[in-house]
Image (tube, rainbow, N blue to C red):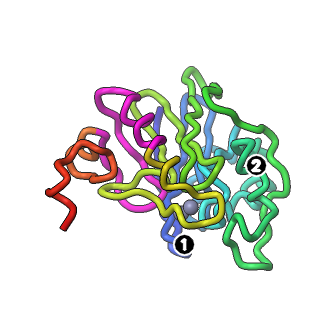
Amino acid sequence: MEVKQIVSHMFGSNCYILSCREESAVIDPGEYSAELDSALGEIDYRLKYILLTHTHFDHMYGARKLKEKTGALLCVHELDIPGLTDYSLNIGYTGMKFCKNADISLSDGQILKLGSEEIKVIHTPGHTVGGVCFLTGDMLFTGDTLFAGTIGRTDFMGGSYTDIITSLRRIDALGDDLTIYPGHGPATTLKTERENNPYMGHMDNDSYFM
Ligand SMILES: [Zn+2]
Ligand SMILES: [Zn+2]
């Protein structure tokens, strides 16, 4: 699986293009930027899926235009689908237009095929109620659940600190090591986060409670 990262300069969110053989998917098109458009041009606008880690505006504002241009299927966890149309859930500005419906309602453990590879849906609530991570090979796309050195906010509607900590335990158990591609900021690894991220639960208490 090939990965290309495109940062939205409008929102500071990360968009990723995954490609395997002739098939491609986009994760979290926060913004339909010129950079995203030219990257899509390189794959002749052949896009199978638009995958959302969650339905906050900064991860899906570009999805409507992306869908119009490519006809790709919009995939959202069933519990985050209300966030497509509810502005109190997606924390968008009124006037921003989003896709109104998902084409595929995702649930935990679901497998999506891309080329000869698979993308697995891992339900990781806490930042939003229907937040997910996408696992393919040794790569994990974590949205706003896990960042390098920290985690996503849990004070938005549908957020839960207890749930995000449980979700981090699930991520921890996914393997010895994975490359982590978060929704904001630089990529990291699961090993690095076990060592440096206080929320992962592996550090001594007094090393971070200052
Ligand atoms: Zn978010
Ligand atoms: Zn975000």
Q: Is residue 103 above or below residue 152?
A: above
SS at mark 2 in the image: helix
Q: Badge 1 local density, few (<14 within 10 Å), some, or many (20+)? A: some
- Tell me if I can see residue 32 in this picture: no
Would the CB of label 1 be found within 8 Å of ligand 2? yes
Regarding ligand 1, which quadrant of the image does it lie in? bottom right
Residue behind mark 1: 11
Q: Position of residue 96 (x, y in %)?
A: 76, 74
Q: Badge 2 local density, few (<14 within 10 Å), some, or many (20+)? A: some
**First to last magenta residue range:** 166-190
Is 176 part of what is drawn in magenta?
yes
Residue behind mark 2: 70
Q: Position of residue 24 (x, y in %)?
A: 61, 38
Q: Position of residue 188 (x, y in %)?
A: 31, 48
Residue sitting at the far bottom? 94
Instruction: Give the residue type at disc 1.
Output: Phe
Query: Where residue 91 is drawn, which disc sits there?
Result: none
Residue name at image x 36 percent, y 35 percent: 172
